[in-house]
Amino acid sequence: MIIFADQIIPSIMKYGIIGTGAIGGYYGAKLAYSGKDVHFLLHRDYDIVREKGLKVLSCDGDFSITSIHAYKDVKEMPLCDVVLVGLKSVNNGLLAHLLPPLLKEDSLVILIQNGIGLEADLQIMFPNLSIAAGLAFICSSKTEPGIIRHECYGSINIGNYSCKDNAKLQAVIDDFTHAGVKGCTGRISRGTLEESCVEHAFQRHDGRPEYNDRPTSVKSKDRTAHPRPDAGGDSCRSTFRCREHSRTVCRQDDSDDTPDGTVFTKYET
């Protein structure tokens, strides 16, 4: 925080994104597009993102990050004030070597992942680390290298796990708000997280999956072809009805070898 006389000017925080997929890529892109200092760690998408940038096809309006801080090696990334982790939780063992090059003494790590107990596991790995959990209320997918499709929703709740600096948590929410992402902060409730994982993600509607109104987090790997209602019988791999936009969304799921996959995550706000 910089203070000039009676005027307070917030310092610009530096963000690191580990897992630039359907979730981490979307929120990182929103922050970067709003002018925040965001640095993306990429794997298979690195070459194409370096060449063409990161593109988001969004129900709220398409946008691209053409001048992007993209890295293939985490050791080349700068120290970050906030690190957003969007990896699949089965790959969290990689955090032991992915996080240290990014961390300062007061860095905050926010896990935007599916699963219970991930924060506790990370705290064992890094006892003095400030950790929070991000609950994403979004439907998005990475449809091809360097392209993220945002179908609907998009807010995020950040639950404090071990961060003693509440001002930093609020600053993150303020940055998200400035980027056009609704959000709020709170304390993690284990009961709420457990409920979110065991609730059924879908209710059937005319033979197709539909989001219910309960908080839930689910990764879609539905390989059953459903007929497109608006494409003359063509098929796709996942279909659902978006209540927010009152339409049926239907599109091709990612292939099994895509590192980020298609992720549907919904949390009631």
Image: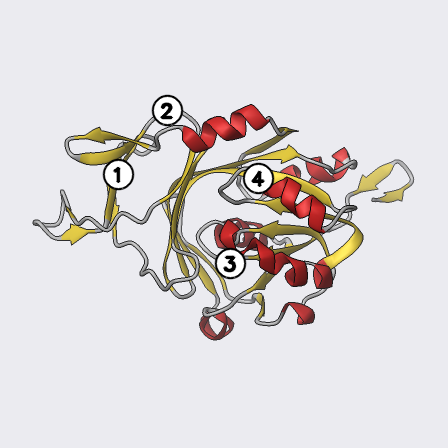
Residue topped by disc 2? 213
SS at circle 1? strand
Residue topped by disc 3? 20
Say whether disc 1 or disc 2 marks the residue closer to the N-terminus: 2
Residue at (33, 27) in percent of width and height: 212
- As measured in the structure, the alpha-carbon distance from the residue carrying label 1 to the one carrying label 3 is 24 Å
Q: In which quarter of the image is the N terminus?
A: top right
**Label 1 close to label 3 by CB (< 8 Å):** no
Counting other residues with Cα less than 10 Å from the Cα at mark 4, is it few (<14), some (14-19), or many (20 or more)?
Answer: many
Say whether disc 1 or disc 3 marks the residue closer to the N-terminus: 3
SS at circle 3? loop
Residue 28 shown left or right of residue 198 in the figure:
right
- As measured in the structure, the alpha-carbon distance from the residue carrying label 3 to the one carrying label 4 is 15 Å
**Label 3 close to label 4 by CB (< 8 Å):** no
Residue topped by disc 4? 134
Residue topped by disc 1? 240
Asked if one can make out residue 175 in the rendered structure from this viewpoint, the answer is: no
* Type of amino acid under label 3: Thr
Residue at (68, 71) in percent of width and height: 76
Say whether disc 3 or disc 4 marks the residue closer to the N-terminus: 3
* Type of amino acid under label 4: Gly
Counting other residues with Cα less than 10 Å from the Cα at mark 3, is it few (<14), some (14-19), or many (20 or more)?
Answer: many
